[in-house]
Image: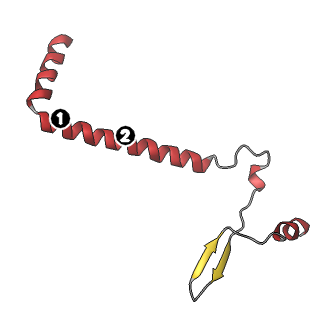
Amino acid sequence: MIRSLLKITWRNLFKNGWFTFANLFSMTIGMATSILIFMWVYDELTYDRFQTNYNSIYQVKANRNFKNEILTSDEMVFPLADALGNE
């Protein structure tokens, strides 16, 4: 029975070539996109988890006004680390 089902499936794949191609192509794109989204979410959730005290890690960002445009950046002045450590 399985042999006959596979035979019918094989015939239909070649009989409807463009339909088969469209289905396989869209399934491939969907699976690849799902895998990439999963990998991105996993990376975001496990960011800095290798550190021993990862719950107490903070990121400092600065909002700067440059020609009436607010820019957010990660660049900080070097003495800021000492000032944050002392306070």
Q: Nearer the viewer, residue 80 or 87?
A: 80
Say few, some or many: other residues with alpha carbon within 10 Å of mark 2 (under 14 / 14 to 19 / 20 or more): few
Disc 1 element = helix
Dot placed on the residue nearer the N-terminal end, 1 or 2: 1
Specify the quadrant of the image occupied by residue 24.
top left
Residue 31 numbered tag: 2
The structure residue drawn at horizontal position 20% and vertical position 41%, both measured from the top left corner, is: 22
The structure residue drawn at horizontal position 10% and vertical position 33%, both measured from the top left corner, is: 16
Q: Position of residue 9 (x, y in %)?
A: 16, 23
Q: How far apart in space, not on screen, are marks 1 and 2 (Cα)?
A: 16 Å
Q: Which residue is mark 1?
A: 20
Q: Position of residue 82 (x, y in %)?
A: 88, 67
The structure residue drawn at horizontal position 44% and vertical position 41%, both measured from the top left corner, is: 35
Q: Is residue 55 left or right of residue 9?
A: right
The structure residue drawn at horizontal position 59% and vertical position 81%, both measured from the top left corner, is: 70
Residue closest to the far bottom = 68
Q: Position of residue 17 (x, y in %)?
A: 13, 33
Q: Nearer the viewer, residue 66 or 58?
A: 66
Compared to 58, does 9 lie above or below? Answer: above
Tell me the amino acid under the disc marked 1.
Thr
